[in-house]
Image (tube, grey):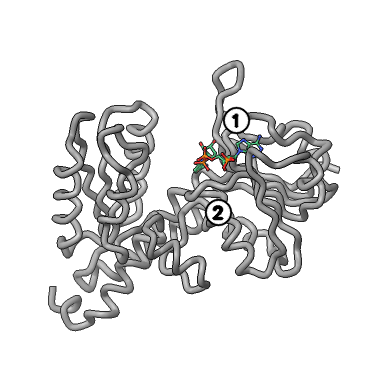
Amino acid sequence: MTAQIINGTLLSQQLRADVSRRAAALAAEGAQPGLAVILVGSSPASQVYVRNKVKACEDNGVYSVLEKYDADMSEAALLERIAVLNRDARIHGILVQLPLPPQIDAHKVIEAIAAEKDVDGFHVSNAGLLMTGQPLFRPCTPYGVMKMLESIDYRVRGAHAVVVGASNIVGKPQAMLLLQAGATVTICNSKTRDLGHHTRQADILVVATGKRNIVTADMIKPGAVVIDVGMNRDDNDKLCGDVDFANAKEVAGFITPVPGGVGPMTITMLLVNTLEAAERKAASQPERASKQ
Ligand code: NAP
């Protein structure tokens, strides 16, 4: 059996078309959605990520500002910039590209972002809302994964979902979203004994470790949905995921490729979160939006 590929690029195009349409409707009311992206330092990978985010905004009718600072920026200066953006009415979403240089406490920075502009969904208040089943912003990568499951009409309710990886930005929120959708969820981390014992029970297997080939074909239940969040480089420096794709696709029912799987969905869901923040703001100030 060869798995059906869940094409994140194609699904992203469909979702982005909807973002463009809704962003244009808001812009017509004088309430164009706006995203501020902050980059501290000059890590090549981070530069590519922020460039892609800003380009996605430009392509889909979302106003964006990119603020770049030197790696020696002080924590106080960054907090001051966030305070300014929190007050800026044109900005509905604020994203600080991680990781930050060592002199800056990332937790402090995330908590400084106004919760209603925290489009990454990392603020403790948004993490708490997600945990208690009333999410305001769903973190972009796990939100994208849920959209991928929706796109194949997968019945998550009652399924056994296994999430490999338990980070605050992917694994934990992923587990919460799957739980809320009615799945029975197992979360694995680096201390898990006999990872394959758990993954072989998964109807839905989400892998987010940053460890190439951590999941091999023999660790997959035949017919399972396999979602590969990992981003690694293979021996030829080509982008690859955490799953041994070539062999896994002969066992899985559905599988996401890397590249072209979860990656494009993450940026798409950032646009969706920014758009929804702008829609909420416009709905709370209908008169102001129509007069602008
Ligand atoms: P992270 O913060 O490094 O977390 C990795 C998680 O994997 C940790 O919970 C760790 O367990 C767990 N882990 C490590 N080795 C393991 C093992 N042998 N067995 C089971 N679990 C293991 O990474 P992250 O930020 O979640 O990102 C994970 C991967 O996804 C990376 O490759 C990253 O580049 C990629 N990513 C992709 C996107 C996208 O848009 N496609 C977005 C975000 C991240 P402990 O908790 O025990 O340390």
Q: Residue at x 56, y 46 (%)?
A: 262
Residue 237 image-quadrant placement: top right
Identify the amino acid type marked 1: Cys
Amino acid under disc 2: Lys
Q: Residue at x 33, y 42 (%)?
A: 97
Q: Is residue 154 left or right of residue 40?
A: right
Image-quarter location of ligand 1: top right
Please rate how many residues cluster around mark 2, counting C-alpha atoms within 10 Å: few if below 14, some from 14 to 19, many from 20: some
Does 284 sit left or right of 137 as displayed?
Answer: left
Q: Which one is closest to the eye, mark 2 or mark 1?
A: 2
Q: Residue at 75% across / 63% down in the picture? A: 159
Against 93, residue 267 (above or below) is: above
Q: Is residue 276 left or right of residue 181?
A: left
Circle number at residue 240: 1
Whether residue 124 is visible? yes
Q: Secondary structure at mark 2?
A: helix
* Label 2 vs 1, first from the N-terminus: 2
